[in-house]
Amino acid sequence: MFNVQLMQVMENIIRYLKHSENVLIASHVNPDGDAVGSLIAMGLALNALNIKTTLYNESKIPTVYCFLPSVARIVPTLDNIQNSTFEYDAAIVLDCGDIQRVGKMGSELGKSGSGFQLINIDHHITNTYFGDFHLIDISACATAEIIYRLIKKMGVPITSAIATCIYTGILTDTGSFRFSNTNKAAFEICNEMVALGVDPYNVAKHVYGRYSMGRLKLLNLALDTLEVSYNGKVSMMTITRDMFDETGTQAEDTDGLINYARRIKDVKLAVLIQECWLPDCQLPVSDYHIPVKKQQSEIKKRPGSVAKNRNFHVSLRSDGTIDVASIAANFGGGGHRTAAGFNIESSISDLKYGIFNLAKEIVN
């Protein structure tokens, strides 16, 4: 729920944007439904005010979100961002806990003296408050909820296209209204979006309706790695680069796999370890907007370990009794209380050993 301070920030952002002619809008690498939906909705709203926009995401948009209106407008490169003739009056960064989550262009956007105002709109408790304007509402179910309120405050009519993007953002970030971030506003806003023309069946059909054979084969391999701690409180799955290669899959195909480990009876903490298959370790597609930083803590190694280190991404989910955002923050990551993650360089054996030992202390 917006307080007086956030309302003032929103009004300041609107005032600045209405005096802008050309705005860059970006969201995090390997985008989820909230990142894509919020990006397009914000762009369409500014276009309605005759403001030129560039929609930017350096990653390939996951197939499941390619049905969204105007998705083809999202570009993966910005040729002019490093030039002295940088043409934007403002840059809006959506759904990113840290500016580096934008990807390769993060450092350029975060430079001081860039000549434009950087607007940070997010709902994650681990947000680093980068930029010039900070519209951060950790009570929001999704960034799409904040974008909805911003668009309403701007006085822009919500079209069917904008409504579909907002609905998709909220639907996916709340896990179809199943996750703990689901709030009253999630239902109220989605109900309004349906009244404005959203077809819930059509959205669900695209987002959840079909899986590739490769994804099912990857699930099969991942389930074969499933381990549970001696006390039954911690579950763990592992996905290696070899598994991606064998099944012909990619980052977007891991979305939701951790839930199989999370839903085991009595499990309080679920862990999915993924070997990074991209140079900057930006995995996975929906893992809660993790700032890529040097790890701050060390995973406890097995006694006498000499295993070779590799790069991994560790996803964490809890049943609500464990704050996994605080765990992830110790390793330069972040996220929500019940869903977070971090990147780390380790051997797979040391990583699993260390997580089980760390988890044992936390659960106990």
Image (spheres, helix red, strand yellow):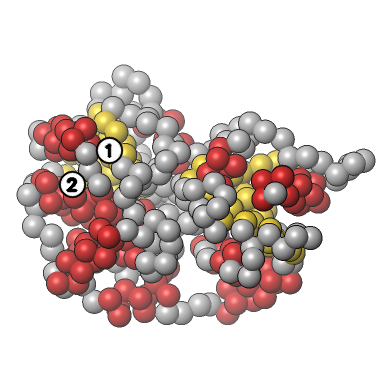
Give the label on residue 150, or none. Answer: 2
Above or below residue 173? Residue 129 is: above
Q: Residue at x 31, y 19 (%)?
A: 113
Which amino acid does the dot numbered 1 rest on?
Leu
Q: Nearer the viewer, residue 82 or 177?
A: 177
| 115 left or right, relative to 30 | left
| x and y, in percent, of residue 228 in the image | 73, 63
Q: Residue furthest top?
A: 113
Q: Earlier in the sequence, mark 1 or mark 2?
A: 1
| x and y, in percent, of residue 176 in the image | 38, 69
Q: Nearer the viewer, residue 106 or 337?
A: 337
Q: Is residue 262 visible?
A: yes
Q: Quadrant of residue 160?
A: bottom left
| Mark 2: secondary structure | helix
| 308 left or right, relative to 52 | right
C-alpha separation, residue under disc 1 versus residue under disc 2: 10 Å
Callout 1 touching callout 2 (CB < 8 Å):
yes
Q: Residue at x 22, y 43 (%)?
A: 2
| Mark 1: secondary structure | strand
Which amino acid does the dot numbered 2 rest on?
Leu
Q: Residue at x 32, y 58 (%)?
A: 183
Q: Which residue is mark 1?
A: 135
